[in-house]
Image (cartoon, grey):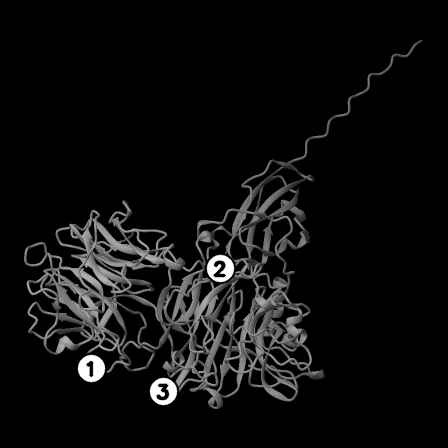
């Protein structure tokens, strides 16, 4: 519902404006770093766990159980998929590498009952395999100190209860993919100690001793050894491995240990296939393996799973052909009644109405990771279908990410947590019947319970994106483009504000006279709920194509301010976008680009005050902290990086910013996420060790407020006063803006004074606005009460903030003040009469 012009050209506010004007006194507190004198407290257990970062990404991997020749289902069931890879099994016990609790992969064991146990910590582990007795796991792990300081991989062993970690090798070269013979005596692995022969298969006693090369006479490279699991004379010496003569012919499976020596494992037509990753069947008869040699409707040269029977003259049987890449396979359970498990890309099918679509390699999904880089997860919510040219484009004049070919989606999507951190609001592309459309959905924080938001007024071809909730969760600001599309096919865009519960549009941000219409986007709320920041197309010297950051008070949508013009005045030509308020509400970080073309790396992150009267560059380092750089071109970072840093998302405490950037200068390099420490400029990689692309981060910002008050106080006499100490605590993980303590005394006592470190409150209002309370902070509030009526007088306390508290059970307390009657007056003694003399 648009406002209409009234007398004097003033636009009357719609329902949202009127309601928010009533809320402004609640939120109208001075944003500060925290109340003076506030004491830090020990955060709760919930606060000490790293917050999560949601983003859209590709390339996530997880384990899948093969259910038929065209389908693999998540091994661990519905819900978010952890980054689990390289599974191998012995019977019903499975071991695998995973990043569930660490930024680097560790070894985990899944027991036959389905429970999962972590076996290692602090390693960079890979290629786990159970020993034949089932009591230990051998694996390889990176260690620093190799040639030229590189990290070489050594072999290790750990028991299945997580004890007895033992180093098996310690050399300056790589040793990988260990496997133990069925009699438990020998350890085989791939290694590269000899530069002349390259990587080959070696064997030595498991207990230690001299290693002997098993391969090398054929030339080429030998990897991925796997001992046969059956301990009898016919099987225990058999070892399958992958042999690669050269890149042109590709890998081939071979076998050692038979009377005729080193021979191809497959015969006939399959002998010429590209094959690798052999995994023996539990009875030792035949192997599972991977091959790209299969005709299918797949969209790439993916691996497929095959089963080779014991008789090499028989053709392999297809086990799984799915439209996603696979990188390992193993058999779980008995030969009859068991099932294969594969390591595969997690991407689900794209959202296509009425079609049972297959998984798609190019589907970007909603994902998340902890702020320490551990536990990357795929939440299983398809977001968009990326143009494959985005991964191969080297032409700076093209941008397939945002100008994709027909049938693919641009990366014009966003995701954010709801104020209580329990759900995620996300943009998704789907088939709308008249072509691809973009809609806004919500899911819970694990990707489950997916619901489309019923936003009113949508046309059949409209695109909705950039969703952001008000801090109280009542309203949603977003961008609507009518009709949606790419480039010239796109209609005008505008910022709408909707009632989050009903989807009714309650207002629109309308550009003032003289400003360009149809290019507003990327709205975001200030932490206290009083301001919106957004991006608007700008016209500089009569030319378009630039963008500026604007702000507008939510209670008066006429008072729009060009923030970019305030810190980059005149004909300063920049592209500023993606604003993000700091948690204390005092600053806005945003992207700036002031070079020409994709190849010109004049990009950075800029920080400005909300008023626009101060500005400094956060990135690149060459201009860091410079206010002058805000008014001129940023330096070229083609050589130094970071490459196109953008999409700032603040951590809850305001000390760090999560952002995306390319790993290298070429435009086909995918973006990853990094963390910038604002005070020092230090950059920490967050997702660079993950494959694929990660973009548009949003950081969990939930708040856990607590009020602590004495249960009772010493008695106070009618007419007298006493001081009560009430603590307001923010357990985090985010700062709590707009924090307010409310008092509800009975008639038997009167609140006569309220103070806290750095401020006082109007006692008669029975409320005390504390502003922004940093995470892990206690604000002591002193409340003076005066007794009026005798008896036990209960005073109720409650605390709330602009951000919804998802755990409100400790947001209230009660103090009983015993009021006693005044002491009876002391009687005046009767004076003794003085005798009269006569």
- Of mark 1 and mark 2, the one earlier in the sequence is 1
Q: Nearer the viewer, residue 606 or 782?
A: 606
- Say which element carries label 1: loop
Instruction: Using the image, tell me which numbered label, if any, was put on residue 433.
Output: 3
Q: Are marks 1 and 2 in contact (CB under 8 Å)?
A: no
Seen at 27% across and 61% down, the residue is 192
Seen at 18% across and 74% down, the residue is 69
Decide: is 216 above or below 508: above
Instruction: Determine which residue is flagged by label 1.
Output: 295
Decide: is 244 above or below 421: below
Alpha-carbon distance for marks 3 and 2? 38 Å
- Of mark 1 and mark 3, the one earlier in the sequence is 1
Instruction: Determine which residue is flagged by label 2.
Output: 702
- Say which element carries label 3: loop
- Say which element carries label 2: loop
> Residue 395's spot in the image, x, y percent?
45, 84
Q: Residues within 10 Å of mark 1 (few under 14, many from 20)?
A: few
Alpha-carbon distance for marks 1 and 2? 50 Å
Seen at 26% across and 70% down, the residue is 326
Q: In this image, 806 relative to 257: left or right?
A: right
Q: Residues within 10 Å of mark 2 (few under 14, many from 20)?
A: many
- Name the image quarter holding the N terminus: bottom right
Instruction: Using the image, tell me which numbered label, if any, was put on residue 715.
Output: none
Which picture quadrant has residue 269?
Answer: bottom left
Q: Nearer the viewer, residue 512 or 199?
A: 199
């Amino acid at each position: 519902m648009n406002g209409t012009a009234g007398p004097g050209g003033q636009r009357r506010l719609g329902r949202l404006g009127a309601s928010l004007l009533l809320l402004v006194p609640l939120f109208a507190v001075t944003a500060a770093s925290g109340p003076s004198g506030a004491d830090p407290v020990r955060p709760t257990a919930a606060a000490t766990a790293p917050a999560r970062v949601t983003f859209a990404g590709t390339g996530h991997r997880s384990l899948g159980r093969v259910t038929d020749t065209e389908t693999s289902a998540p091994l661990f069931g519905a819900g978010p998929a952890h980054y689990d890879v390289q599974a191998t099994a012995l019977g019903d016990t499975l071991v695998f590498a995973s990043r569930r609790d660490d930024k680097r992969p560790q070894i985990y064991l899944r027991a036959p009952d389905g429970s999962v146990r972590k076996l290692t910590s602090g390693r960079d582990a890979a290629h786990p395999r159970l020993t034949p007795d089932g009591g230990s796991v051998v694996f390889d792990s990176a260690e620093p100190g190799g040639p030229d300081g590189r990290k070489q991989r050594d072999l290790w062993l750990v028991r299945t209860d997580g004890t007895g970690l033992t180093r098996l090798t310690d050399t300056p070269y790589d040793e990988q993919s260990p496997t133990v013979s069925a009699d438990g005596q020998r350890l085989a692995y791939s290694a590269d100690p000899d530069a002349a022969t390259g990587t080959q298969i070696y064997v030595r006693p498991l207990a230690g001793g001299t290693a002997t090369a098993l391969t090398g006479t054929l030339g080429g490279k030998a990897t991925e050894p796997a001992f046969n699991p059956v301990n009898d004379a016919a099987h225990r010496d058999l070892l399958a491995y992958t042999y690669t003569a050269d890149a042109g012919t590709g890998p081939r499976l071979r076998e050692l240990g038979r009377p005729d020596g080193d021979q191809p494992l497959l015969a006939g037509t399959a002998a010429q296939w590209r094959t690798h990753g052999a995994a023996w069947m539990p009875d030792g008869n035949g192997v599972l393996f991977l091959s790209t040699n299969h005709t299918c409707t797949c969209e790439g040269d993916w691996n497929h799973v095959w089963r080779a029977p014991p008789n090499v003259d028989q053709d392999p049987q297809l086990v799984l052909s799915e439209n996603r890449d696979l990188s390992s396979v193993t058999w779980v359970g008995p030969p009859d009644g068991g099932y294969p498990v594969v390591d595969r890309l997690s991407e689900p099918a794209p959202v296509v109405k009425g079609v049972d679509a297959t998984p798609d390699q190019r589907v970007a999904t909603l994902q998340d990771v902890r702020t320490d880089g551990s536990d990357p997860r795929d939440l299983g919510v398809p977001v968009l279908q990326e143009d494959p040219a985005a991964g191969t484009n080297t032409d700076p004049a093209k941008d397939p990410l945002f100008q994709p070919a027909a049938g693919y989606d641009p990366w014009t999507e966003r995701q954010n947590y709801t104020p209580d951190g329990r759900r995620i609001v996300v943009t998704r592309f789907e088939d709308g019947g008249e072509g691809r459309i973009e809609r806004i959905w919500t899911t819970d924080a694990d990707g489950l319970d997916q619901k489309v938001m019923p936003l009113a007024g949508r046309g059949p071809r409209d695109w909705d994106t950039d969703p952001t909730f008000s801090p109280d969760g009542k309203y949603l600001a977003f961008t609507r483009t009518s009709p949606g599309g790419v480039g010239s096919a796109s209609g005008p865009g505008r910022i709408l504000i909707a009632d989050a519960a009903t989807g009714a549009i309650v207002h629109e941000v309308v550009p003032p006279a003289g400003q360009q219409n149809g290019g507003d986007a990327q709205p975001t709320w200030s932490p206290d709920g009083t301001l919106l920041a957004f991006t608007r197309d700008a016209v500089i010297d009569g030319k378009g194509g630039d963008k500026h950051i604007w702000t507008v008070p939510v209670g008066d949508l006429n008072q729009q301010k060009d923030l970019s013009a305030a810190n980059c005045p005149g004909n300063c030509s920049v592209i500023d976008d993606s604003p993000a308020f700091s948690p204390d509400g005092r600053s806005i970080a945003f992207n700036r680009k002031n070079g020409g073309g994709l190849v010109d790396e004049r990009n950075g992150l800029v920080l400005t005050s909300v008023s626009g009267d101060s500005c400094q560059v956060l990135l690149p380092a060459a201009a860091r902290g410079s206010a002058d750089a805000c008014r001129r071109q940023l330096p070229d970072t083609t050589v130094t990086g970071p490459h196109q840093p953008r999409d700032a998302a603040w951590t809850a405490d305001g000390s760090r910013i999560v952002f995306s950037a390319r790993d290298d200068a070429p435009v086909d390099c995918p973006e990853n996420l990094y963390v910038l420490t604002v005070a020092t400029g230090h950059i920490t990689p967050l997702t660079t060790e993950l494959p694929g692309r990660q973009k548009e981060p949003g950081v969990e910002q939930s708040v856990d407020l607590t009020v602590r008050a004495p249960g009772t106080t010493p008695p106070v006499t009618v007419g007298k006063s006493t001081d009560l100490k009430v603590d307001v605590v923010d357990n985090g993980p985010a700062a709590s803006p707009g924090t307010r303590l409310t008092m509800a005394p009975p008639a038997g006592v009167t609140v006569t004074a309220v103070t806290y470190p750095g401020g006082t409150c109007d006692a008669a209002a029975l409320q005390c606005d504390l502003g922004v309370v940093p995470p892990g902070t206690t604000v002591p509030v002193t409340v003076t009460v005066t007794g009026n009526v005798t008896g036990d007088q209960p005073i109720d306390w409650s605390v709330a903030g602009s951000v919804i508290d998802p755990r409100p059970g400790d947001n209230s307390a009660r103090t009983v003040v015993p009021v006693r009657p005044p002491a009876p007056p002391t009687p005046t003694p009767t004076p003794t009469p003085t005798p009269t003399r006569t």
